[in-house]
Image: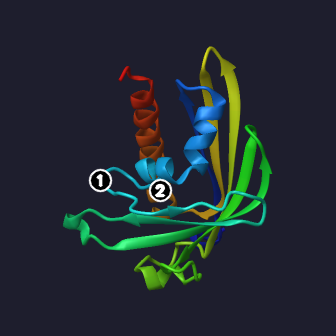
């Protein structure tokens, strides 16, 4: 089997010191998504969330100035939602209006898929702790899959820091 045709799922699991409802809301409330979306050094200047089955969210990730400072947009089209348990969506690159574009138009290499099916699951561990598993399906084996893993791990690091700040006394 050639490298081009090899695909595998990217699975990342993280435990947060926050209850399920709080972690769930971090994924669906625009002001929270904007605090954690994007790898370290990147920001999210906008997140338009339409969190319902069939809904389409539009999230923006801005590169740091030293990497060009450009904006990259993704849509998340929700295919299933089980409140506080799981949701699934298809992620696609888009322009600032949510119109799907080919990843190459965003300057990405050929091994970047046109769409990525994603499942996010939540498990209540008790004592105010939540396990989240993010599964991105059918990634071509290669650099973009590895960069996506690193990026999602850094997003989840930022989410953990955001949730920790929300527990700090005012």
Q: Is mark 1 on a helix, strand or loop?
A: loop
Q: In which quarter of the image is the C terminus?
A: top left
Q: Which residue is drawn at 48% across and 71% down?
A: 73
Q: Residue at x 52, y 54 (%)?
A: 30
The residue closer to the viewer here, 108 or 66, is: 66
Residue at image mark 1: 41
Q: Is residue 149 visible to us here?
A: no
Q: Residue at x 29, y 53 (%)?
A: 41
Q: Is mark 2 on a helix, strand or loop?
A: helix
Residue 90 % position (x, y): 68, 65
Say left or right for 21 vs 71: right
Residue 91 % position (x, y): 62, 66
Is disc 2 in contact with disc 1, using a CB cutoff of under 8 Å? no
Q: Is residue 116 visible to us here?
A: yes
Residue reaching furthest top? 127
Residue at image mark 2: 146
The residue closer to the viewer here, 28 or 12, is: 28
Residue 141 % position (x, y): 56, 62
The residue closer to the viewer here, 113 or 39, is: 39
Q: Quadrant of the N terminus?
A: bottom right
């Amino acid at each position: 089997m050639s490298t081009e045709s090899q695909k595998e799922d990217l699975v990342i699991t993280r435990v947060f010191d926050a209850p399920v409802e709080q972690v769930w809301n971090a994924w669906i409330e625009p002001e929270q998504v904007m605090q954690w979306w994007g790898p370290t050094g990147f920001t999210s200047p906008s997140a338009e969330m339409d969190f319902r089955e069939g809904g389409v969210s539009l999230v923006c990730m801005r590169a740091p100035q030293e990497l060009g400072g450009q904006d990259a947009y993704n849509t998340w089209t929700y295919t299933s939602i089980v409140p506080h348990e799981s949701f699934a969506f298809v992620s696609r690159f888009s322009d600032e209006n949510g119109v799907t574009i080919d990843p190459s138009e965003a300057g990405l290499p050929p091994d970047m898929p046109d769409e990525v099916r994603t499942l996010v699951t939540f498990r209540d561990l008790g004592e105010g702790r939540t396990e989240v598993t993010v599964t991105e399906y059918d990634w071509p084996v290669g650099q973009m899959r590895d960069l996506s893993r690193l990026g999602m791990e850094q997003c989840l690091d930022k989410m953990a820091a955001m949730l920790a700040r929300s527990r700090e006394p005012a």
